[in-house]
Amino acid sequence: MKTAKRKRSVPTRSILIILTGSLYGLMGTMLLHAQDEEPPTEAQAKAIASNILELDDFKLLYPSDYIYDHAVIYNPDDHKWHMYGIQMPHTSYIHLTSDSLTASPWEKKADFTYKGLSIWAPHIIKQDGKYWMYSTAVGKELRELVLSTSKDLQSENWTHYHNNPILVRRTPAGFDGKIKDCMLYKEDGQWIMYYSVVMERTNDKDHWVVGYSTSKDLLTWSETKVAFDQNTDPGVESPFVVKRGKYYYLFLSGRPWPIGGVDVFRSESPFHWDEKHDYIKRFPKNPTKAHAMEIIQDHNGQWYMTRCGKDIGGWWIAPLTWNDGQ
């Protein structure tokens, strides 16, 4: 009768050492492969970056033959969203309100006017318990940035700043800088105002850029510096800046006009974007017909892009998704 041989057991500690050694070996192999891989090319990096933003279908918020550059802001006191935007004739802004950002149609209120002048492209912020609206007013000789303030956003309750204009620009040769399409962003206690502006005029051609000025008090603004320079005529329009993580995203319309669409650039600085290096995505005019956009975040954190134009039947909105892990 054969006696069964007793199997030799392996101590648990030995198994742990073997498994640990295998794990480190696997990690080392992975590290070596990772070191062998080359970093992505600029084209590959841009392809990855272009997927950061996704735009869903647009929905009509308010039908109109002509609505252009506009501003959207929420008033917690009356629990309503407010929109002010260019309409025909250019001597007034259309004013719309709604309880919901995406409800349709919005309710039309009384128009906003500024001293009988043509006015373009408002932008509205809230600071120190009141609302500040910055607009381009078209005077007899120059386009000027002007300020009006309100405590409740109602059309009839705006006060025009007594020391307007707050910002005017001439080219070195004395031509109108045609300043327009302003947008404000706050960074480290300092306000940055972006706008489209002509830096020079040569041989009847305007050199358009995205300019910027800075301010501590929203009233006194620095001289124009250049944030984005493509040197086209017609040029960049409707700059809008959003910060996500370490990046500042610049949205631009009208590159070049009338092709339209919206182009997106990103940079680690709020003061400079490069036309080629920082470009990541285009939302073409067809089929999105995106132009003169606003980038808006609702109370639930959802982002949206609005669009407008004389050829799209009104004012529209679409969900905007960020795939950047923020």
Image (cartoon, rainbow, N blue to C red):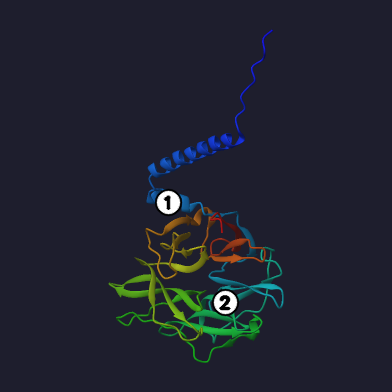
Q: Quadrant of residue 104?
A: bottom right
Q: Up-down: is 61 above or below 186? A: above
| Residue 45 image label | 1
What residue do we see at 56% from left, 34% from top? 14
Question: Mark 2 Cα within 10 Å, few/some/many (few <14, many 20+)?
Answer: many
Dividing the image into 4 quarters, which one contains the C terminus? bottom right
114 shown above or below 238: below
Q: Position of residue 83 (x, y in %)?
A: 62, 72
Mark 2–mark 1 Cα distance, whole angstroms, equals: 35 Å
Left-right relation of 290 to 109: left
Q: In the image, residue 255 lies at what x, y percent?
A: 42, 62
**Residue found at the far bottom of this picture:** 162
Query: In the rendered view of the protein, which quadrant contains the N terminus?
Result: top right
> Label 1 neighbourhood size at 10 Å, few (<14), some (14-19), many (20+)?
few
The residue labelled by disc 2 is 124
- Amino acid, disc 2: Ile
As drawn, which residue projects farthest toward the top?
1
Which residue is rendered at x = 63% and y = 22% of the image? Answer: 7
Decide which of 10, 296 is in the foreground and name it: 10
Q: Amino acid at mark 1?
A: Ala
Percent position of residue 94, x then y: 61, 75
Direction left: furthest residue: 203
User: Residue 134 versus residue 113: which sits nearer the camera?
Assistant: 134
Circle nearer the viewer, 2 or 1: 1
Query: Helix, strand or loop at disc 2?
Result: strand
